[in-house]
Image (cartoon, rainbow, N blue to C red):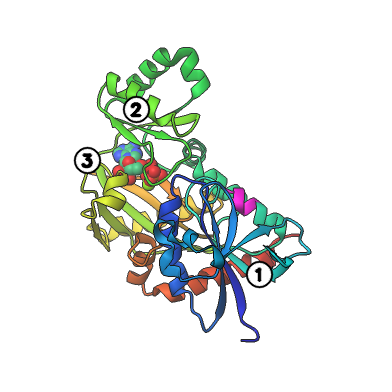
Amino acid sequence: MIGMKTVLVLFGGVSSEHDVSLVSAKSVIENIPKDQYNILCAGITKDGRWLVYSGDVSKLPADKWLADEALLTPALMSPDRGEKGLLLLSAAGIERVPVDVVFPVLHGKNGEDGTVQGLLELAGLPFVGCGALSSAVCMDKAVTNALADAAGIPQARWRSLTEFDYQKSGAILLEDAADYLGFPVFVKPANTGSSVGVSKAKNRMELFEAVESAFAFDNKVVLEEGIDGMEVECAVLGNDEPLASVPGEVVPCNEFYDYDAKYVAGTSELHIPARLPAEKLEEVRASACKVYQTLGCSGLARIDFFVRHSDGAVLLNEPNTIPGFTAISMYPKMFAASGIAYPELLDKLICLAIEKWSKVKK
Ligand SMILES: Nc1ncnc2c1ncn2[C@@H]1O[C@H](COP(=O)(O)OP(=O)(O)O)[C@@H](O)[C@H]1O
Ligand SMILES: [Mg+2]
């Protein structure tokens, strides 16, 4: 239809969360209002190839889309602003496919961390979600924590450790961190998501093991004081004037919200709204907006907190700039509970991307 905008949905990616992205992207593609937008789908394989996919979206999960070569066309995203779209590399030669706006549905490294966002900024294409700087800042848990401290946002005590320093003087540094943080300590690679590489250490022995396994994913790890609290999440939407959703609560089915509790076991409980007094819900919403603005977010982010059992303190856990996005994921569900249905939410996100781009000083 003339006047319809073309949305390029990016999925997959070179990330430990590749498979989660496939499931999120399937829902996004199914729910983008088709009377308003044409959809172009491009998958990024685990080894980083870009392929335009013209087949059925139900084949995204578990990478089944890669099976039908006739429906795949290698493609390039050029940083050349003259192109304004994707370059398809077909047998007939190079074909330019114009794109109006990009929706990166990529979780974790090489997608949620500012890399793809930087490419899209160079390419001069509006895109959904946070820009390169904010995406990178929110991806790195040590940088996020440092900025939150600087802004006076309450959070767990923490330390970060590089692999280089660990190899030089790991024993002393871990001893010192354990004294400062107490047990249990949560150990996380600085730049993963979906709880990949995260562990809970209850003593010095486990702390060493946890740090070693986190270094398998990143050469910087973050150690945090374990918080005994309710896990509360808040979805935020907007550019200059962010809107916070009704907060939700996650009750992990395991000892903490690990990969299995998130995606495999299927028995973690979700409560929307979180089972907290109204004033506490308001405090979470206000804090979510403060975090969002402190970290320079735009478009969307899900901001996760702990509400500590002992004193009710609202403590930042982490921001997620491309949160899980299936129809049953917390971000869309929290906005559904706040009166914005999933297709409308996607439309708003696309409009926010275009609005933001219109204000960028080029
Ligand atoms: N400081 C902490 N205290 C208590 N639990 C924590 C802490 N940090 C992380 N967790 C647990 O580990 C999970 C994953 O950690 P998180 O920082 O959210 O990493 P990811 O980016 O992988 O989701 C959290 O949802 C929570 O269950
Ligand atoms: Mg998390």
Q: Earlier in the sequence, mark 2 or mark 3?
A: 2
If you read the primary sequence from the N terminus, does the residue marked by circle 3 or circle 1 appear first?
Answer: 1
User: Given the image, on which type of amino acid does mark 2 rest?
Assistant: Ala
Foreground mark, 3 or 1, reads 1
Question: Residue 179: which quarter of the image?
Answer: top left
Per the image, label 3 sits on a secondary structure element best described as loop
**Coordinates of residue 218 in the picture (x, y in percent):** 48, 33
The picture quadrant for ligand 1 comes to top left
Question: Considering only vertical position in the picture, is 182 above or below 330?
Answer: above
Q: Amino acid at mark 1?
A: Val
Q: Is residue 8 visible?
A: yes
**Picture quarter with the C terminus:** bottom right
Amino acid type of the residue that numbered disc 3 sits on in the rendered structure: Glu
Tell me the number on the disc at residue 210: 2
Q: CA distance from mark 1 to mark 2?
A: 44 Å
User: Pointer 1: what residue?
Assistant: 99
Alpha-carbon distance for marks 3 and 1? 45 Å
Count residues near mark 1 (Cα–Cα under 10 Å), then give few for <14, some for 14-19, many for 20+. Answer: some
Magenta stretch bounds: 114-118
Residue matched to label 3: 255
Q: Residues within 10 Å of mark 2 (few under 14, many from 20)?
A: many
Residue 115 lies in the magenta-colored region: yes
